[in-house]
Every structure is written in structure tokens, then in C-alpha cells.
Image: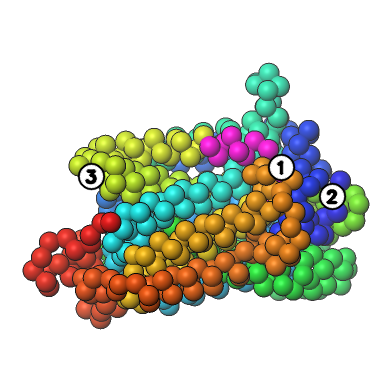
Amino acid sequence: MIDGAPLLADLAAGATDGIVLQTDEGLLPEGLNVSFKPIPSVIVMGMMLLFIVAGFMFKVADTDDMWVAGRSIGNIENGMAIGANWMSAATYLGVAATVAISGVYGLAYVVGWTTGYFILLIFMAAQMRRFGKYTAPDFVGDRFNSDTARALAAITTFLIGFVYALGQARGMGLVGMYILGDWSALTGGALSAYQTMMVVFMVITVGYLSLSGMLGATKNMVLQYVILIVAFLLGLLVTGWSAGYTTILPQLEYGMMIDGLAAEFSEPFAGGSYYLWIATCFSLVFGTCGLPHVLVRFYTVKNERVARWSCTWGLFFISLLYLSAPAFAAIGTALYGEEIGAVYGDPGMTGAAGDVLVVLAAQLAELPSWFVGFVAAGGIAAAVATTAGLFIAASSAISHDIYANIINEDATQRQQVLVGRLSIILIGLLTIVFAMNPQQPIAALVGFAFSLAAIVLFPMFFLGLWWENTNRPGALAGMTTGIVVWFIPMFNEGNFGLIDGGLGIDVIATWMPAIGSALIGTPIVFAVTIVVSLVTTEPPLETKQMVRQCHSPDPMPKDKTAADIVAEKNGSGNTPADD
């Protein structure tokens, strides 16, 4: 069994040898009651049925509804959708797991993910809405006048969605086992209990997304946020009270428990070095600002004012859970130590148990199975909500940015929607295949996606909005460099089986871990983009005018983009020119 304390740090540093989490046992977390539970099953299946019904009720017929929900979403509704879209299995399950297993190092996730929204609020939310496209690759393609840049951004978006979704699929499978039990017999033993549950919930998710598009997904995200936040906060309150650790405010009271927990929980950087903490935090902060499925939320509102308020409300809704996750980690760690065994050392808590610690803690507190099932349902709602946002962003990259803008410029709306639905099915199948045997905890899987977003896309968004002289050659050089830089630590650590055992180069593993590679990679991409832009021809005047329009104090109509306003002022047609 794995030494729990340095598990995530070892992952980040490239020590992936020997960390397959109970593959032969189907990723069965120790101590988890894997059995069919009637009432929790009714709760979860009723919830999934509700998602499918909502998707059908708001099913899409045109590209506006498919990709940006007709730009009709209000600020509080969009804030809740941002919260649900954001609070994935990595938040609902993974943050508590990371804090429990890696101690203070795990707080990098809380700090990084929260801080990123302040940067979004101040520097990007309103400006992205004023630019006014459908997708993140749309912004890159039109801002830098390049179909090649659009394609690179679309491929990156698809890759982010795929890597990020692996963590959500893992969460669905692990939590699903608690609720529905072991259904592996139905597959004739071909699939394990974990694999069966993961496939069941992923198929349902893909089914409703194929119908609903962004409009239905947004309506569902509001439902999902309500379910997950009530389940998490109520679960924390009741678990802490029932176990005798806290009373009314676990978020404040859990501090009194820390002295009774092991040094691995409370000693700074026992679960990861100071440098690793900084690197992880940096990647999460700027990865937040580069995630396509987050930025597209600002395209679903009618103007830049609503975009800013959406971001503010989203930060509030997110903070409700982030302020509570460390308390759940402390309570879950104490209960695990009392009821199951030593949390740290050899043997210790495995990553699989850590990833369901929120559910496991409620179970160990001897709460009724229906209540534990409700807590588990919140984890599934979180995973489904984020998967929805990821798949919509990834499918729009394929359908809108590659198919409609590069392959078939005369594509009808019906053709684009069809390709979008097929793209959702494709990424769903890929996720299912690669999530059959995930070799990293949820938080680590998500961390890889954040590093990619921070290295490749964030510099393009930030420079594209704030420096009008950023040009096509600079963007192409920067994005190409970023993709190469991101893959270096991934190859070095052998993640996803890219190289069996990895390259194992110690210098790269120490100073550029995959989970925090943006600390080195993002400045490199900024430098390459700026230098190449300075030594090559400036972008066209119309492009500079679009950037200025993103900062204009004049309000913009709901159905206008920066390019439309510039074209009207110049008395010309569409301004962006493709390479």
C-alpha cells in the first residue's frame, strides 16, 4: 500500500512508478461500504433523470443556443452555473482528499483556484464579453487573424477537456460504487465495480449533453449547484456534529482538532516542498484564467456588466465550498484514523480512499445511509456539471472552430449542431476508455489540465486583450512553444502511458513537475510571444481597434461583437483575415 503523505507530491515530482491504485481490486477504497442502497439509489437516479429531462426541455436547434445559450443568462444564474461548472469532482472530492493526504500542500488548490477568479474579474471577464465570440478558440483565431492559431487553440481546448474529464469520470465511478454497489457481474466480469459505475454515469452524462447543448447544460448547472452545495455543507455540519468534533460552524471549529492529527496533516510542506507548493499554486491561478469552459460562461450573458457580476457571484458561490473543504478533510482524517487505521505511513490511506473521503467520513460517522447517499449525490452532481462544461467547450472547438471555420465554411447551423453532438460522443468515448484505469488521484489529473491552460491559452488571452501589438507570428510561436513545454514533464513522468516509466530526468522532475509546470512554462510563452511580436510586422489597424473596443466605456449591444463595431465604424465588412 502507498505511503499516503507524499503521494500527491510524488505524483507531481514524477514518481509514478508503483502507484497504480488497487487496479486488481477495481479501485475499491478501503473502508467504503460498496453495496446497493435503495434510498440513495433512488436519490441519485432521480437526480440523473432530472438532468436528462431538463436537457430535453431546453434542447437546442441552433448554434446560439448550442454554444452560448442565446446570450440570455442572468448574473446570479450564471454565477451559479460558474460555481457548478467550476466545482468539479476535484473540488467536491479532490480538495478534501489532497488536504487529508498531503496536508498543508493541499491548500495550494484552495488558494490557487480562488485567486484565479480575482484575475478573471479584474482583467478578463468584461473584456472577453466585449470581444463577443462563441468560444475561446474563436477569440484566438479572430484576435490573431489566423486559422492556424484557431486550430491550435481548438486542439488545446479538446485536450484540456479530455484530461480534465478523466478526473470527473474517476469521481463518478468511485462514488457510484457506494450508492449502487458492484454491478460488475452484469458485464460478465469484463469490467470491475469501479469501471462499471464510471461507464454508467458517463453514458448518462453524454446522453443529456448531446441533447441539450449550452442552454440545457446551463439550466442543469443551476440545479447541480444547489444539489452539490447543500449536500456538501449539510454533510459537513452533520458529520462533524455526529462525530463529536464540531457543532454549528465546522469551518471555524476544526482548527481545534489539528493538534490531535498527525504532523503530516498540519506541518507546513510535509506533503510537498515549498517550491512545489508555489509551482502548483501558480499553475492553478493562471490555469483558471485559461480554461475555455470557464471563459465561455462570459459569452452566455448579454453584456459586460452582467459578465462582471457573474464572476463576482461565481466567486461567492465557490468560496462557500472552498472555505469548508479543509474542515471536511480534518474530520475525515480523524475518523479514518479511528475507524480504519493509520492515515500516514505504510500502510496508510490510499488515493482511492482519499478521493471518496467526503462520502467515507459521513459513513464512518454512522449517519443514515440515505443521508450519506445524498452527500454522495452531491459529488456526482459536481462531476456531471463540470463534465458538461468541458464537453461543450471541447465539442464547440471541433464543430465551430475547426469544422465550420476551417473545413466547411458554408456549414449550416444544423450541420454544426450535428457535428457538435458527434464531438460530445467522441470525447465521451475517449474519456471512458482512458478512465478505465486512472493512475492518478482526481486532483492530480485536473492539475495537468490547469497547467496546459496556463501555459498555452492564458498568455494568448491576456496579451490578446491587453497588448494590441501582439500579432499572428507571436501567437503561433507562443502557442507552439507552450504545447511543447507542457509535454516535456508529461513525457518525463510517463503520465497516461506516454512513455512507459517516463524519462525520469531528475532536474525536470524537481523544477518542472507536470502538476506545476506553468511556473516555468507560462513566462517562457509570454517571452516568446512578446519577442516574436516585436521583431515582426505589427497587426492590422482593424485588429488594434478590436482590442481598444474591448476596453471602451461605451456599452455594447447584446448581439454585437468588437469586430462588428469596428467594421461599422470603418464602413467595411468583416475585419479578421485568415492566414
* Amino acid type, label 3: Glu
Whether residue 344 is visible to the viewer of this picture, yes or no, is yes
**Residue at 56% from the left image edge and 51% from the top image edge:** 164
Task: Give the x, y percent position of residue 436.
Answer: 64, 35
- For marks 2 and 1, give the one nearer the viewer: 1
Please tell me which residue lies in front, 40 or 192.
192
Mark 1 — residue?
500
Task: Give the x, y percent position of residue 474.
Answer: 39, 68
Whether residue 81 is visible to the viewer of this picture, yes or no, is no
**Residue at 68% from the left image edge and 53% from the top image edge:** 492
Mark 2 — residue?
2
Which of the 4 image quarters holds residue 419? top left
Please tell me which residue lies in front, 221 or 27.
27
User: Callout 2: helix, strand or loop?
Assistant: loop
Please tell me which residue lies in front, 306 or 48.
306
Against 91, is 173 above or below? above
Mark 3 — residue?
409
**Residue at 43% from the left image edge and 70% from the top image edge:** 529
Magenta stretch: includes residue 437: yes
